[in-house]
Amino acid sequence: MDKLDEIFYLQSRFDQDLARRRNLDYDMSTWVQKGILALVSEMAELLDEVNFKWWKNAKPVDVEAIHEELADILHFYVSLCLKVGLDAPGLHKAYVAKNRENFLRQQGLSDRAGYES
């Protein structure tokens, strides 16, 4: 099992256990809303780790805390992927296609408006 497959497998097991233990049964739209709110919350926690508040005294950056917040973000992102039916191979395929399109856009070779040379 590759690392991305393992992450999706572990997250799926966790999500199923959590749903069973807490009796959670939301529709996909509600799961997406909850997933986005969780991601925004975790991103705010990450932002707090890097002294963005110029009006406060800076504290030393804790790289371990940054790693933990990034892992939390991945946790909720993968959970959200699973809720909308996107598995590890599907995410890989979508990522590769989007990455190719992003390069084409920056090279002025995309068919999308706004990226012409």
Image (cartoon, grey):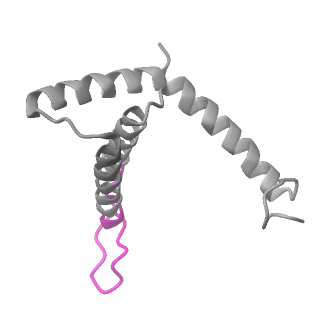
Q: Where 37 falls versus 75 (above or below)?
A: below
From the viewer's side, name the closer residue of 48 and 78: 78
Q: Position of residue 14 (x, y in %)?
A: 24, 27
Q: Where 20 falls versus 69 (above or below)?
A: above
Q: Residue at x 31, y 75 (%)?
A: 58
In this picture, residue 89 sits left or right of residue 98: left
Q: Residue at x 40, y 26 (%)?
A: 8
User: Looking at the magenta stretch, what is its main secondary structure?
Assistant: loop
From the viewer's side, name the closer residue of 28 and 44: 28
In this picture, residue 74 sits left or right of residue 2: left
Q: Position of residue 62 (x, y in %)?
A: 31, 56
Q: How many marks?
A: 0
Q: Where 47 falls versus 8 (above or below)?
A: below
The magenta stretch spans which residues? 46-67
Q: Residue at x 90, y 65 (%)?
A: 117
Q: Position of residue 74 (x, y in %)?
A: 39, 41
Q: Residue at x 47, y 26 (%)?
A: 87
In this picture, residue 31 sits left or right of residue 2: left
Instruction: Please identify the quarter of the rendering in which residue 91 is found.
Output: top right
Magenta stretch holds residue 76: no
From the viewer's side, name the closer residue of 73 and 111: 111
Q: Residue furthest top?
A: 1
